[in-house]
Image: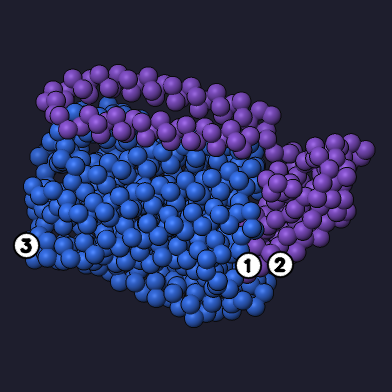
Amino acid sequence: MSATEVNGKIEYSDPENRNALIAVKSHLIAGFLVFLLMMIAGFTMRAAQGTWLEIGADLFYQIMTVHGVGVVGAAMITSTGVQWYFLRQYVRLSNGIFWTNFFIFLTGVVLILGSIFVGKYGGAWTFLFPLPAISMGAWSNGAAALFQAGLLIIGVGFLILYLDFGRAILARYGSLARALGLTQLFGKEPVDYKHPAAVVASTMVLIVNFMGIAAGAVVLVMGLINLFYPEFKPDALLMKNLIYFFGHVVINATIYASVIAVYELLPRYTGRPWKTNKPFYAAWFAIVFMVMGVYPHHLMMDFAMPNWALVVGQVLSFGSGIPVMVVTGYGALMIVYRSGIKWTTSAKLLFLSMFGWWAGVIPAILDAMVTVNRAFHNTLWVPGHFHFYLLLGLLPMLIGFAYFLAGEGDSKEQPKATDKLGFYAYLIGAFMTSMVFLASGASSIPRRWAAHMPEWVSFAQVGTVAAALVVLGMLLFIIRALVSLPGASNPR
Amino acid sequence: MISTVYAITLVGIGLVIAVFYFVIANSKEADPDYPSITKKWYGVRSKWFLFLLVLGITVSVLSTNPFPTPDQKKEYSGGDYQNVTVDSHQWYWIMTPSTVKAGQPVEFQVSSADVNHGFGIYDEKLTLVAQTQAMPGYTNKLIHTFDKPGKYKILCLEYCGLAHHAMISELTVE
């Protein structure tokens, strides 16, 4: 295969491109609408904990369940839209399969919403075995089954999509190792600085998500069997391992899929190349293993876990922070430094995402130390660190990409006042939300509590104000997306 | 320990903010010689990577020796330990006995009769002092020595259904 073929972009017909653009926009708009609803759900929970809103515990835990599963689902579908947009430029992907996954996803969403708001399922998105089957009358086995079937269906859709990714990547690069840049890393091929970062990242996401979703399917099927045949009782610790492997991998992979937007767009905005090189390949190769091996940090208070597994969880958690602190985040700092960048909303958001990811690493790796975990596990410290990643890392990547797609990134115009208001409301709200969670965790306040003790209420009230700002920022972003995205042509 | 971890986090986030602010403040004027910038900062990056590596290895070794959670194979009976059996249920705790003495290690044998729970011990200031998971089919041994007498609260730290937040009990330390 010649270098031109490897580095060249794939040509599609005009109808294919038009259809692809509609598909990507559909993913973004659907994902953003779900995110907005989930932010309103988060605001509602904080207001209830802050005693500003009275809701029953049953409804609170249903909202908590939909918030968790909704954010994970929205993160998956939106990040897949970003990833697919760039990956299809380098490998020939099928529009039909992309749409198929989208509609399977929507079907799964309907099942999940039905299970929660009709069937009153409130077993949390983690469906920790055997809680779905033992609700003390709060929901039926049918509702729990519907929830798990919804997740299973969504997983099947993504597996089909990843098969297409795998087929296309293999067709172009011959092996996953070559697509990951390993042949260059280990000296079998000369280093090609133009080897697309989108292909490297997508290959990593493909591998880990295939494994993660497969594990999820196994645990979901075992849970479903248990619901209808209670005499089948899988080991609770095995189930917990499978659930956290699945859950950690799929949510973690969304940020690795979305960071492609940073690799592709920051060079465009700064006029500087983001070259792939050996440290880049080494980082992404390590990420493949770290994302899959890190999950025991969720199980550090399960003393039946072997100590070596917890040490692996601790060490890999620290290791997982290194690629962003040394390669991706560091690279973003270098590319922006004295670049003359024009700070469009898209550029601001993409750069913010690097800050959110980097800063979010700190509370995460600390909590992933066994000795620290004893005082922080299942306190609000945990949502503190992942809201940092999601609100200030993942979402700015996704929204920054949407602004690019709406044509704002290359526009000569200054950002509009509403864009600025949206950006700063979101920035302040998201930072406050995360910091209040961290402060709450440092005050030992437990997570997933419908009603807070009087000593904790003021934290939740500040958190409510912060969540309101996040909702305001997101609302303005969505209005902008709904106005600008549908008619926008593909940026060249 | 909690306040140290919190302080490290705040300082760390503050430093990251400072670095990003510095880069933003130096972003508007363009320096066309990007290769010189990358050459200089790639050099810094190698040292930064080495620093993180040494830090990670040092902290990992120091923080896991001795291992922070109790040896589950060891028997903690006899005169050195007080023993408390903890059975967790949706949505209550049964602790036998529910009174222990300060200054002598307590072994909590924690199990669950139904779903996963989290056995969290809170002092009178509502600070979490020790915890372990309560899982069906397993018994976790948690060792804790209470420094001060008082009324400690037991809160559930793993979501276990609709009255999860009401699963509260009391442990008396004399």
Kindly identify the residue that appears in the image at 16 percent across and 37 percent down.
A341
Residue designated by label 1: B161
A101 to A297, vertically: above or below: below
- Judged by depth in the image, the label closer to the viewer, 1 or 3, is 1
Q: Which mark is residue A14?
A: 3
Gap in Å between the C-alphas at discs 2 and 3? 60 Å
Q: Amino acid at mark 2?
A: Gln
Residue designated by label 2: B90
Chain ID of residue with mark 1: B
- Do dots 2 and 3 share one subunit? no
Gap in Å between the C-alphas at discs 1 and 3? 53 Å
Gap in Å between the C-alphas at discs 2 and 1? 8 Å
Q: In screen coordinates, is A434 left or right of A400?
A: right
Quadrant of the image containing the C terminus of chain B: top right
Query: Tell me, what hue is chain A?
Result: blue
CB contact under 8 Å: marks 2 and 1: yes
Answer few, some or many: residues within 10 Å of disc 3's Cα (few below 14, many 20 plus, some between 14 and 19): few
Q: Total number of numbered labels?
A: 3
Chain in purple, by letter, is: B
Q: In screen coordinates, is A410 left or right of A171?
A: left
> What secondary structure is found at the residue carrying circle 2?
loop
Q: Amino acid at mark 1?
A: Gly
